[in-house]
Image (cartoon, rainbow, N blue to C red):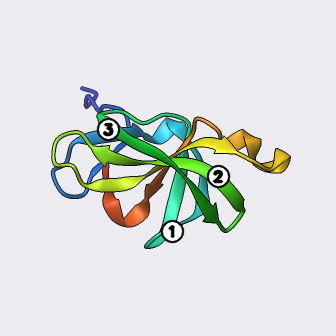
Amino acid sequence: MAEMVGPRLYSCCNCRNQVALHDDVISKSFQGRNGRAFLFSHAMNIMVGRKEDRHLMTGLHTVADVYCCDCREVLGWKYERAYEESQKYKEGKFILEKSKIVKENW
Protein backbone atom coordinates (compact mmCIF):
# COMPACT_ATOMS: atom_id res chain seq x y z
CA MET A 1 0.00 0.00 0.00
CA ALA A 2 1.40 3.42 -0.96
CA GLU A 3 2.11 5.91 1.78
CA MET A 4 0.30 9.24 1.44
CA VAL A 5 2.83 12.06 1.51
CA GLY A 6 1.96 15.73 1.14
CA PRO A 7 3.96 18.30 -0.78
CA ARG A 8 7.44 19.22 0.40
CA LEU A 9 7.25 22.59 2.06
CA TYR A 10 8.89 25.01 4.46
CA SER A 11 7.53 26.14 7.82
CA CYS A 12 8.34 28.89 10.31
CA CYS A 13 11.20 27.73 12.55
CA ASN A 14 9.44 29.18 15.59
CA CYS A 15 5.85 27.85 15.36
CA ARG A 16 5.85 25.43 12.39
CA ASN A 17 3.29 27.48 10.44
CA GLN A 18 3.57 26.48 6.76
CA VAL A 19 4.99 29.41 4.79
CA ALA A 20 6.19 28.14 1.37
CA LEU A 21 6.16 25.20 -1.02
CA HIS A 22 9.42 23.63 -2.15
CA ASP A 23 8.10 23.79 -5.74
CA ASP A 24 8.12 27.61 -5.47
CA VAL A 25 11.88 27.84 -4.82
CA ILE A 26 13.53 29.87 -7.60
CA SER A 27 17.05 29.99 -6.14
CA LYS A 28 18.90 28.81 -3.03
CA SER A 29 21.90 31.08 -3.58
CA PHE A 30 20.71 34.34 -2.03
CA GLN A 31 22.08 36.18 0.99
CA GLY A 32 19.80 37.27 3.83
CA ARG A 33 20.51 39.34 6.93
CA ASN A 34 21.66 36.24 8.83
CA GLY A 35 23.28 34.09 6.16
CA ARG A 36 21.90 32.01 3.32
CA ALA A 37 18.42 32.65 1.97
CA PHE A 38 16.09 31.24 -0.66
CA LEU A 39 14.18 33.16 -3.34
CA PHE A 40 10.55 32.00 -3.66
CA SER A 41 7.95 32.87 -6.27
CA HIS A 42 5.18 32.68 -3.63
CA ALA A 43 4.79 32.59 0.15
CA MET A 44 1.75 31.82 2.29
CA ASN A 45 0.53 32.43 5.84
CA ILE A 46 2.66 35.55 6.09
CA MET A 47 2.08 39.24 6.70
CA VAL A 48 3.85 41.88 4.63
CA GLY A 49 5.19 44.91 6.49
CA ARG A 50 5.63 48.46 5.25
CA LYS A 51 7.69 49.20 2.18
CA GLU A 52 11.11 50.80 2.48
CA ASP A 53 14.11 51.39 0.26
CA ARG A 54 17.18 49.30 1.15
CA HIS A 55 20.64 49.13 -0.34
CA LEU A 56 21.22 45.39 -0.79
CA MET A 57 24.18 43.54 -2.31
CA THR A 58 22.64 43.90 -5.78
CA GLY A 59 21.70 47.57 -5.52
CA LEU A 60 18.76 49.67 -4.35
CA HIS A 61 15.43 47.88 -3.91
CA THR A 62 12.07 48.69 -2.35
CA VAL A 63 11.34 45.81 0.01
CA ALA A 64 8.91 44.94 2.79
CA ASP A 65 9.71 42.58 5.65
CA VAL A 66 7.58 39.43 5.79
CA TYR A 67 6.39 37.94 9.08
CA CYS A 68 4.85 34.61 10.08
CA CYS A 69 1.13 35.34 10.50
CA ASP A 70 0.95 33.13 13.61
CA CYS A 71 3.98 34.08 15.76
CA ARG A 72 5.11 37.31 14.00
CA GLU A 73 8.68 36.03 13.47
CA VAL A 74 10.49 38.01 10.74
CA LEU A 75 11.20 35.42 8.03
CA GLY A 76 12.69 37.60 5.30
CA TRP A 77 11.34 40.18 2.87
CA LYS A 78 9.35 40.74 -0.30
CA TYR A 79 10.88 42.55 -3.26
CA GLU A 80 8.42 45.28 -4.21
CA ARG A 81 10.62 47.16 -6.69
CA ALA A 82 14.06 46.82 -8.23
CA TYR A 83 15.65 49.96 -9.58
CA GLU A 84 18.19 48.26 -11.83
CA GLU A 85 16.92 46.59 -15.00
CA SER A 86 18.93 43.41 -14.37
CA GLN A 87 17.20 42.94 -11.00
CA LYS A 88 13.57 43.39 -12.17
CA TYR A 89 12.98 39.59 -12.11
CA LYS A 90 12.91 39.80 -8.29
CA GLU A 91 9.86 42.07 -8.14
CA GLY A 92 6.95 40.42 -6.35
CA LYS A 93 9.15 37.57 -5.12
CA PHE A 94 10.05 36.57 -1.54
CA ILE A 95 13.31 36.02 0.31
CA LEU A 96 13.01 33.57 3.21
CA GLU A 97 16.09 33.14 5.34
CA LYS A 98 17.31 29.56 5.73
CA SER A 99 17.80 30.07 9.48
CA LYS A 100 14.12 31.06 9.85
CA ILE A 101 12.47 28.13 8.04
CA VAL A 102 12.43 24.35 8.45
CA LYS A 103 11.69 21.57 5.97
CA GLU A 104 8.45 19.59 6.29
CA ASN A 105 7.41 16.34 4.48
CA TRP A 106 10.91 15.53 3.18
59 is higher (above) or lower (below) than 7: below
Of marks 1 and 2, the one in the foreground? 2
Instruction: Residue under label 1, please give it.
Output: 36
- The amino acid marked with disc number 3 is Ile
Residue 35 sits above or below residue 21 on the image:
below
Residue under pointer 3: 46
Under mark 2, the amino acid is His
Q: Which residue is mark 2?
A: 61
* Position of the N terminus by quadrant: top left
Measure how far apart labels 2 and 3 are at the Cα level.
20 Å
Question: Mark 3 and mark 2 in contact (Cβ < 8 Å)?
Answer: no
Residue at (26, 28) in percent of width and height: 4
CB within 8 Å, label 1 to label 2: no
Of labels 1 and 3, earlier in sequence is 1
- Horizontal and vertical percent for residue 94? 51, 44
- Which element is circle 2 on? strand
